[in-house]
Image (cartoon, rainbow, N blue to C red):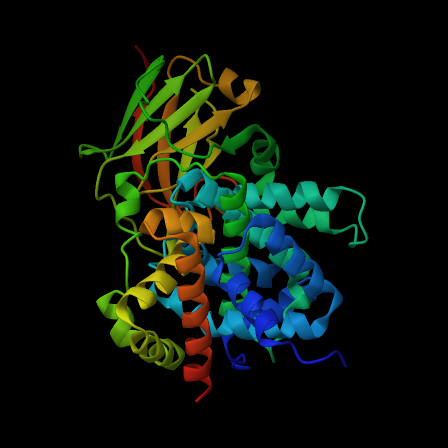
């Protein structure tokens, strides 16, 4: 997926790479709710999500020049950065705080109705390919993506043997790749 | 050119993008990505394949204090010896001033007022003075809880308080017979805690009034209230 050259986020990110300060503020305003949603969803802790959100934008300011619009859309680049920062944080703090009521509203599993109708062409393609997997494997891939936890932790959560978990996810990834490349 | 990645290698990039690897395996993939642009590209392809799942994550607007803390962290970062241009430090200060507190008073206020990460769990605990801020003859809009020991002022809005989306609610301390001093921009949908410097705290004397004015987005451009007063009330010891 390549950036649309007219995408305001892409333009802002390219300006940030040149050290443009106003563009940085604009980028934050346009994208921080998406990034914060990802941090909350994965970390399930508001304080940690706020810290990771700041880490993400610090990294954006320092590493915006590594953004390559021919390789990824700006929002994908930002979301990926956020996911990996959140995963790193999860690896550091394995024990989680019990999620509070606030998080119930953002931690629903599965696609929301509006996501199914209003989402991108890429989202629909991925959904079609996920639906071709058998239901349990499709669920595992989604759970793995949103939880950001290791195979081992995922196996414990889903009460599956570790070996089974690994082989199911690997097979699902191979099937997804071939489906998406069609 | 390096050899095209084997299926097994491709799979570890997919596992990295999905987020299921242990910390040590993640570190190995990241090192390889830095060394080998082909690996970085292969990982990026997997990231893009899975990224549409992010569309399903409900966006959540972060609270305003996160932005100000980020500016502080950027200023701290860029204040350290680095290869970045030296003007970065004044920039972050200027941005904080321009977007939030402005004018002569603000320059002093910036170093003395700080928004804390969250509203207090129980603002009444330890409170030494209260103020009910209301419209003239109208209903209460904010309740202020001053904690003298911690020099913190918690501002709790009533539920469902709204202002025009292109405006900000700015809090002012008005010592008796003196000009209003900005205490920063308030959120209207959640409590905000303001940390007061010794100097600011010293201005909270008998007869001091708290007021909230409606200002352009980000706060008064002049450092003094420019818009309609939404709400005000005297601070009373308890």
Quarter location, residue A111: bottom left
Q: What residue is drawn where x is 52% and y is 72%?
A: B46
Vertical order, B44 against B174 (above or below): below
* Residue A181, percent from left and from top: 47, 86
* Residue B41, percent from left and from top: 63, 74
Vertical order, B185 against A127 (above or below): above
- Of residues A92 and B107, the one drawn nearer to the viewer in this rendering: A92
Quadrant (top left/top right/bottom left/bottom right) for the C terminus of chain A: bottom left
Residue B216 visible in rendering: no
Q: What residue is drawn where x is 29% and y is 75%?
A: A131
* Residue B181, percent from left and from top: 49, 31
Q: Is residue A107 left or right of residue B208?
A: left
- Of residues B16 and B44, the one drawn nearer to the viewer in this rendering: B16
Q: What residue is drawn where x is 41% and y is 35%?
A: B171
Residue B210 visible in rendering: yes
Q: What residue is drawn where x is 40% and y is 59%?
A: A164
Vertical order, B86 against B207 (above or below): below
Q: Is residue B142 left or right of residue A72?
A: left
């Amino acid at each position: 997926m390549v950036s649309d050259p007219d995408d305001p986020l892409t333009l802002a990110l390219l300006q940030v790479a040149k050290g443009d300060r106003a563009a940085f503020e604009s980028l934050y305003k346009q994208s921080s709710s998406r990034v914060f949603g990802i941090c909350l969803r994965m970390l399930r802790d508001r304080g940690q999500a706020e810290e990771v959100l700041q880490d993400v934008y610090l990294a954006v300011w320092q590493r915006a020049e590594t953004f390559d619009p021919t390789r990824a859309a700006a929002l994908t680049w930002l979301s990926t950065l956020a996911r990996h920062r959140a995963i790193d944080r999860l690896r550091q703090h394995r024990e989680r705080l019990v999620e509070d009521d606030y998080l119930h509203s953002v931690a629903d599993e599965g696609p929301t109705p509006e996501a199914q109708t209003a989402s991108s062409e890429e989202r629909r393609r991925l959904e079609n390919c996920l639906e071709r997997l058998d239901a349990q494997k499709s669920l595992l891939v989604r759970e793995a993506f949103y939880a950001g936890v290791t195979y081992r932790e995922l196996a414990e959560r889903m009460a599956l043997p570790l070996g089974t978990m690994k082989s199911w996810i690997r097979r699902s990834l191979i099937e997804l790749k071939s489906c998406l490349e069609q | 050119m390096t050899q095209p990645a084997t299926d097994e290698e491709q799979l570890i990039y997919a596992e990295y993008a999905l987020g299921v690897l242990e910390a040590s395996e993640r570190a190995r993939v990241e090192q390889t990505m830095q060394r080998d642009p082909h690996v970085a590209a292969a990982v990026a392809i997997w990231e893009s394949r899975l990224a549409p799942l992010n569309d399903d994550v409900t966006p959540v607007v972060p609270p305003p204090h996160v932005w100000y803390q980020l500016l502080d962290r950027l200023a701290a970062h860029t204040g350290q010896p680095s290869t970045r241009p030296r003007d970065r430090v004044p920039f972050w200060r200027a941005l904080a001033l321009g977007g939030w507190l402005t004018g002569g008073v603000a320059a002093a206020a910036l170093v003395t007022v700080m928004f804390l990460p969250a509203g207090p769990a129980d603002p009444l605990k330890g409170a030494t003075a209260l103020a009910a801020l209301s419209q003239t003859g109208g209903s209460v809009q904010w309740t202020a809880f001053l904690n003298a020991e911690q020099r913190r002022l918690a501002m709790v809005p009533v539920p469902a308080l709204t202002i025009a989306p292109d405006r900000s609610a700015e809090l002012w301390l008005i010592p008796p017979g003196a000009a209003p001093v900005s205490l920063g921009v308030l959120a209207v949908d959640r409590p905000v805690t303001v940390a007061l410097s010794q100097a600011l705290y010293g201005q909270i004397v008998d007869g001091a009034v708290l007021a909230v004015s409606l200002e352009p987005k980000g706060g008064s451009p002049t450092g003094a209230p420019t818009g309609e007063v939404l709400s005000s009330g005297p601070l009373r010891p308890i």
